[in-house]
Image (cartoon, rainbow, N blue to C red):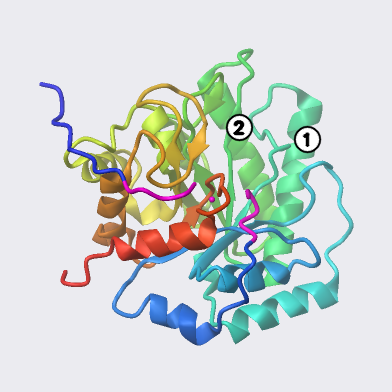
Amino acid sequence: MAPKKRETRKRKTEDPGEDGDTEKEPRSGEVRRRNIRGCSKYIGAHVGIQGGIWKAVDSCVAMGGTSFALFLGSQRSWKRPALDSSAADKFREQCSLHTFDPAHILPHGSYLMNCGSPKEDVFEKSQALLVDELSRCSRLGLTLYNFHPGSSLGTITTEECTEKIATAINHAHQQTPAVVTVLENMSGQGSTVGGKFSELKAIIDKVRDQSRMGVCLDTCHAFAAGYDLTAEGGVKAMLDEFDQQVGLKYLKAIHLNDSKGKVGCNLDRHEDIGKGHIGIPAFRDIVNEPRLDNIPLILETPGRPGFEYAEQIELLYSLFDKKK
């Protein structure tokens, strides 16, 4: 029997720039704490590092976020200048000033990386970049690092691809201390690995130090891969399956994205919260799901004018049931 669909009431709003910039003045750390009083959800967005990596903290505070994601360098180059010590110190100082726990900050890996690539030159550059990024995390005082697992490019098997990804992770773990490598689930588009929870588990099983492994679940990717979050109990069903196949102990973060595509479309097309095919009821379930307490919940939505990250964060917090 097909799962029962819920009635979805559309919320009339304007539509959130991709870097989440707003014209509002930065809010104080006290305002940020007030947003989470009585709420164990840490909601934020992917923010830019233009002008200095410490600016990411300011951007998050300005939009009322309680967690954030960021890139650690340019997305256009395999090689980057070394992380400036004074910049790293300023980042740490800003995190301390605004009371951000490293567990609520989720750096995102470069899109250039493909640790599962059958092309040896790309694999070697990806492996080296993974080491560099984990080293930057350590210098910034960060404990998590999220990245897309990789792609077979259609020329090797999924098993061979997961083996290569695990090899790169094992190498990076040997070269760097402590930081947890967080695999992101994918939409099942093309030859990417990670659309199935079993593929994420296959990678984790091949990693020697599994205490340094985690998973970030992207709602758009999960929906596109066939997990119907719009069905009654859809969010719970997805988490139940994840627990059975991978284990909730590995769940370190959520990417909060609506989907331009329909369930099972395999398209990685993010949409603003409540503007896509997932809809507000599913995000209400997410915000009120106790198994998602105390981990970063990160927006990666388009963020159109009038409905930017600050507005979407405010909307998501408004869905929290304070009576629970």
Looking at the image, which is closer to me, 203 or 78? 78
The residue under the point 35% across, 42% down is 246
Q: Which residue is mark 1?
A: 124
Question: Which quadrant is home to the C terminus?
Answer: bottom left
Is 197 displayed left or right of 291 in the figure?
A: right
Furthest residue toward left: 1
Looking at the image, which is closer to me, 219 or 155? 219
**Relative to 227, residue 244 above or below:** below
Spot occupied by residue 289 in the image (x, y as percentages of width and height): 25, 57
Residue 150 numbered mark, or none = 2
The residue under the point 47% across, 60% down is 311
Going from the N terminus, do you reach mark 2 or mark 1 first?
Answer: 1
Specify few, some or many for label 2: CA neighbours under 10 Å numbering under 14, 14-19, or 20 or more. Answer: many
The amino acid sitting under disc 2 is Gly
Tell me which segment is drawn in magenta. Answer: 11-21
Residue 47, quarter of picture: bottom right
The residue under the point 32% across, 50% down is 283
The answer to whether the residue labelled 2 contacts the one labelled 1, judged by CB atoms less than 8 Å apart, is no
